[in-house]
Image (cartoon, rainbow, N blue to C red):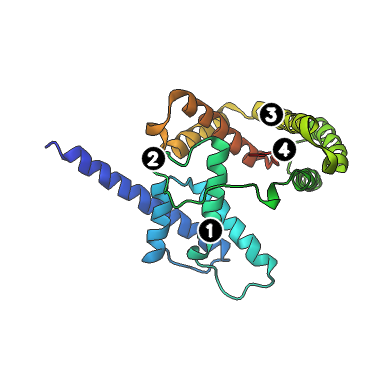
Amino acid sequence: MGKEPVTADIADFGSRVAEYCREIETYLCRKNDGHLIRVTGPSFDLVAGWATQGVPLKVACAGIDRCFERYYRKGPRRRPVKIDFCEADVLDVFDEWRRAVGISLQSPGVSPQSPSPQSPSPRHSLPAHLERVVLRLSEARARGTLDSAFDPLIDRAAAELEAARTKTAGVRGQARQELIARLASLDAELLQQARALLDSPTRTALSNEVEESLAPFRAGMAPESLARARHSALDALVRERFRLPRIDFDHE
């Protein structure tokens, strides 16, 4: 009798992993223009490992997107992409999500083999970051992906970023720290405005999604850390919903 709840929990977990793999298979099929690439055998074990590590489904899909974007840049595709080829990108995006949310590498369910950020890479340079943000804001405006309510803030942010971009190569010491703090302030302002545009049902749906994505990590987190993670995870979903670029700069 005492083992029945444990058995039920294992069965439930197995069911959730199987559903996760089916969702990934369906998404991969769409990305491959309808070509059915089965997630079975070693591929199933790979994707099941993502589920066990706690990789949120949307994060995994974002990693798959990144893999396909690189594939498209190489020219016309010759054959469907298998899920195995997406592993590095999925784990990279998961690592970025963990950093943004504030989940440490030591959190339960996180594989020690997951990539760990060490020294900053060239993509983390401040000039490159500013150039990328200015470009993405311009693209979002041109495509009409941002609500017109963002226009005044975007105009101001774009002007500040462009001014900073022209002189950032010579910014050092205290001036650099002040610029990074300003970027964080602009990013927070952008997110605050985006949150204000959410209706009640959307807020509830996003909050439920946050709880689901953090479920594998909650047991090993202090209450303060969990609260910060919830806030950061919601910010990430809001950013995704409005397709907002990340203005703040991760200089660690």
Q: Quadrant of the C terminus?
A: top right
User: Nearest the camera: 10 or 89?
Assistant: 89
Q: Which mark is residue 188?
A: 3
The one nearer the camera, 96 or 192, is: 96
Q: Earlier in the sequence, mark 4 or mark 1?
A: 1
Dot 2 surroundings within 10 Å: few (below 14), some, or many (20 or more)? Answer: some
As drawn, the label of residue 247 is 4
In x, y percent, where is residue 117? 56, 47
Mark earlier in primary sequence (3, 1): 1
> Alpha-carbon neighbours of circle 1 within 10 Å: few (<14), some, or many (≥20)?
some
**What residue appears at the point 57 percent right and 61 percent down from the top-left corner?**
31
Residue 204 visible within the image: no
Q: Nearer the N terminus, badge 2 or badge 1?
A: 1
Q: Is residue 86 left or right of residue 220?
A: right
Query: Is disc 3 in contact with disc 1, using a CB cutoff of under 8 Å?
Result: no
Q: Secondary structure at mark 2?
A: loop
Q: Residue at x 48, y 45 (%)?
A: 56
Name which residue type carries label 2.
Answer: Pro
Q: From the image, tell me which residue sits under label 2.
A: 108
Q: Nearer the viewer, residue 220 or 237?
A: 220
Which secondary structure, mark 3? helix
Question: Given the image, on which type of amino acid does mark 4 rest?
Answer: Ile
Tag nearer the camera, 2 or 3: 2
- Residue 131 spot, x, y in % from top left: 79, 47
